[in-house]
Image (cartoon, rainbow, N blue to C red):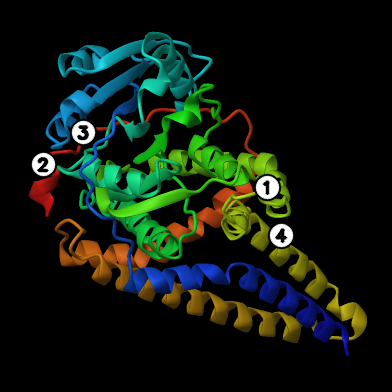
Amino acid sequence: MGYLEIVATVFGAIWFILLVMMFHYVVFSIVGIFKKKKFPVRQEKLRYGIIISARNEENVIGELLDSILNNGYPLELLQVFVVAHNCTDRTAEVARSHGATVYEYNNDAERTLGFAYRHLFKQIERDFGTQNYDGFFIINADNILPEGYISKMNDAFLYYDRKYAVTSYRNSCNFGDNTISCLYGIFFLAACRFEARGRSVCNCSTRVSGTGYVMPASYVKDGWEYVTLTEDWEFTADELAKGNKVMYCDDAEFFDEQPTTLPIMWRQRMRWARGHTIVFFTRFTKLIKSIFTPKKKGGKDNKFSQYDIAVSILPSGAIGVGLWILQVILLALSPLFGYDAAKVWALYGIVSAGAFVFSYLLTLLTGALLMILERKRIPKLGFWRRFTSLLLWPFFLLINVILDVASLFVKNLTWKPIPHGATRKKKVSDNR
């Protein structure tokens, strides 16, 4: 076997192993296409605290609070808590006028959502006692909760005996504003349909994505400890390592507002990528250890979900780029073994171009399938908005590779608020 054959065999084996490690995503996607988990309607209504962190959200927080008040859930069983975090506007005043219990917290050194949650749970424990609630919803200030959302989440939470966190279907209230918001909308719909939905049918854990989830009050009996750039990934990894799960309710749909400009999109996704990298370095070993830790007597087997999330937090983009650089270096050495460099690079270029075209077309077709499957949940979009968004969808995902690599070198990245409300011209129901 010659030098190039050895290189091709070794890298072929590496890529095959990586594909096998992630093949279960294909299974989840196929399952999610055809099935979903349904939860029986329950008459029992639990008591919830609703946690909202808001920084300069006076334009949108009133609409969120109205959507909670008009959700159809018994209001005597709900208490809305807002932490006005480093605000310089009327967020606290607006929240109070809509009946929320508001705590103002100003500490410029503690800027992430996690710090706001940590402070708020301390205040709740002091003034009300966290154990006086059955669970806590984590909601963003720019979210909207359609009527019936809380009841549907209550049904799912009860189905799992109040033991696990339950997350929900994340849609976009400004889906059709422009191509960028549309791409974000497709991104979150894909995560729900091709990941979370299949996992729930297979009784496997999914992960929380930002907000839109409820968790048992027992999870915060000792306070909130997740304060990095991506506290949702931290929370998920730790709960899985403990042997818990994050379940999913597809029928409970909430609406989120997405960025509409390239600079804000880049800033937000860089923060996500850096936070994801931090979680990999701080949680991957813990998850791997948990896979090989014997389950507690009487406990449920959660090993596959632990493996699934461990694979999910791998910096796959950086790994792929690293393998590509190594392969290029090895190919550059081929003339030392008697190979014609021009022919080697020509063949490599053809193979690489073919792989790119195949990946692009496969991603394009997947996006088109998603828009067909989720057509009833996608707000009204013009033909050209759909068409251009689909064409750009593979590149939207490809940016993750660049961000994965960049996140390894970024330092002192801080959380900055995303402006909301400027483009929210209509109610969610008007965009159906």
The three-letter amino acid code for the residue at tag 1 is Phe
Q: Residues within 10 Å of mark 2 (few under 14, many from 20)?
A: few
Q: What numbered label is drawn on residue 422? A: 3
Task: Residue 162: name its quadrant.
Answer: top left
Q: Can residue 162 be seen here?
A: yes
Q: Quadrant of the C terminus?
A: bottom left
* Contact check, label 4 and label 3, Cβ < 8 Å: no
Q: Position of residue 295 (x, y in %)?
A: 66, 51
Q: Residues within 10 Å of mark 4 (few under 14, many from 20)?
A: few
Q: Position of residue 234 (x, y in %)?
A: 56, 38
Residue annotated with mark 1: 284
Residue at point 15% right, 37% down?
A: 71
- Element on which disc 2 rests: loop
Disc 2/disc 1 C-alpha distance (Å)? 43 Å
Residue annotated with mark 2: 426
Task: Residue 29: name its quadrant.
Answer: bottom left
Disc 3/disc 2 C-alpha distance (Å)? 11 Å
The three-letter amino acid code for the residue at tag 3 is Ala
- Height in image: 30 above or below 135? below
Front one among 166 and 169: 166
Residue annotated with mark 4: 322
